Amino acid sequence: MKYDIIMLGLSITSSWGNGHATTYRSLVRGLAARGHSILFLERDQPWYAGNRDEPHPAGATTVLYESVDDLIANYEREVRDASLVILGSFVPEGIRVGEWVASAARGRTAFYDIDTPVTLGKLAAGEREYISPELIRRLDMYLSFTGGPALRHIESEYGSPMARVLYCSVDTNLYRPVIRPYHWDLGYLGTYSDDRQPVLDSLMLEPARRWKEGRFAVVGPMYPEGIRWPANVFREIHLSPRQHPSFYAEQRFTLNVTRAAMKRAGYSPSVRLFEAGACAAPVISDAWDGLDSLFTIGREVLVAENAEDSLRYLQDTSDSDRRAIGDAARRRILAEHTPECRAIQLEGYLKEANDNVSAPAPRRNRRHREVDHGLEAGLASERQRPATGGAAGKASGTGAAPGDLHQPAGAGG
């Protein structure tokens, strides 16, 4: 089968300990709804094999591969013939995969960085874990989870022909308001990280210590056993994405905490911010540059800098004001951050690349033919429309120990 879009990402089948999967699932849904045929190629890794909460994501054919040699041997034709091939951040042996994509693809190529500030920090330090400056120059587009000044830096410092923001989106069929009785005054959904923990302590755990009557909840894996949780903080290790809307509905407010690298860069919203908004859950967020370009502060999201701010919102905000904030956030999400919004945005970037970015000389010389970028019109033909569900390439295996997980930072998981 010929696919017009191929994605090579960290994971789409498992959201355990990462925010990449929900981002890819949402984007795939949006593109498939607009008629695109999509192949998602994922490296089979033990940690994710044992924790696949969606082994057959809708909208794409999903295949697991064993190694880069396996990938090249079996999918060169598909990569060659696709109109767009996207390589994601934190893909194992990403540079080798990307060099192969850049050499083999006749269509447009892109790097989708779901971890932009982390990536830029690694590059500045001379680290080449999954992308290199040389590869950035070879790929046609750099699609970034971070907007703002970082985009011009990627073009000027690393020579990307075209750097554009492509934030996460949220599947509004899954993430929507549901009716549940309140269990928590403030909840938080996120994987443990050293840099987020002090903010979590300031904006949630300290308020919990001071307000004994309040009820709090933290859901996420990898928290060290030595953390001393206040007695009024409920802990859960993991919830599948299908359980998230109910969790948001059971909170009067939900907390958003941004990774330190994302906060320094600014313009780096986490997927949790969009998911909570889609569920009309009133969000209390830490402060960072660019937040006000996405939401109206005070009307669509509340910003806290310390425990006193959190407690004031929790104790002094009326139910009507709280509901109004959640409803306003949902309207914003539906207008600007749905899968269809991202799919249309990506189609626009592809047209821009087709109009303005020359094909790299090695690829052009190797192929000796005109490149046909079939996505420019925005819609694939009816005969190429994918079935509603894909098939993973092999069954799930056994889980690895939590310490084996290479945790990416980008999507706010």
Image (spheres, rainbow, N blue to C red):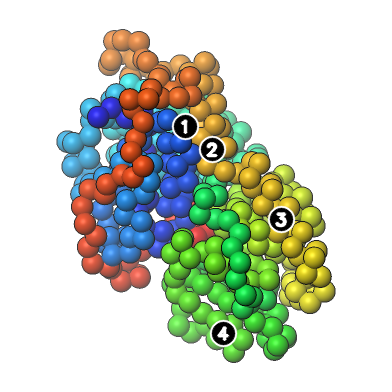
Residue that badge 3 annotates: 327
- Which label sits on residue 34? 1
Q: Residue 313 placed where, x, y %?
A: 78, 70
Residue 371, can we see it?
A: yes
- Which label sits on residue 229? 4
Q: Residue 217 placed where, x, y %?
A: 58, 77
Asked if marks 2 and 1 touch (Cβ < 8 Å), the reply is: yes
Toward the viewer: 115 or 231? 231
Tell which circle, 4 or 3, labels the residue nearer the N-terminal end. 4
- Which label sits on residue 324? none
Residue 95, can we see it?
A: no
The residue type indicated by label 1 comes to Arg
Q: Real-space Cα distance between discs 3 and 2?
A: 20 Å
Residue that badge 2 annotates: 340
Q: Real-space Cα distance between discs 1 and 4?
A: 46 Å
Label 4 Cα crowd, 10 Å radius (few <14 / some 14-19 / many 20+): some
Q: Real-space Cα distance between discs 3 and 1?
A: 27 Å
Q: Secondary structure at mark 1?
A: loop
Tell which circle, 2 or 4, labels the residue nearer the N-terminal end. 4
Q: Secondary structure at mark 3?
A: helix
Q: Examine the rendered structure and indicate whether residue 381 appears above or below residue 119.
A: above
Toward the viewer: 143 or 22? 22
Label 1 Cα crowd, 10 Å radius (few <14 / some 14-19 / many 20+): some
The nearer-to-camera label among 1 and 4 is 1
Q: Secondary structure at mark 4?
A: loop
Q: Residue 384 placed where, x, y %?
A: 33, 27
Q: Examine the rendered structure and indicate whether residue 68 appears above or below residue 209.
A: above
Residue drawn 64% across and 47% down? 333
Q: Examine the rendered structure and indicate whether residue 254 appears above or below residue 382.
A: below
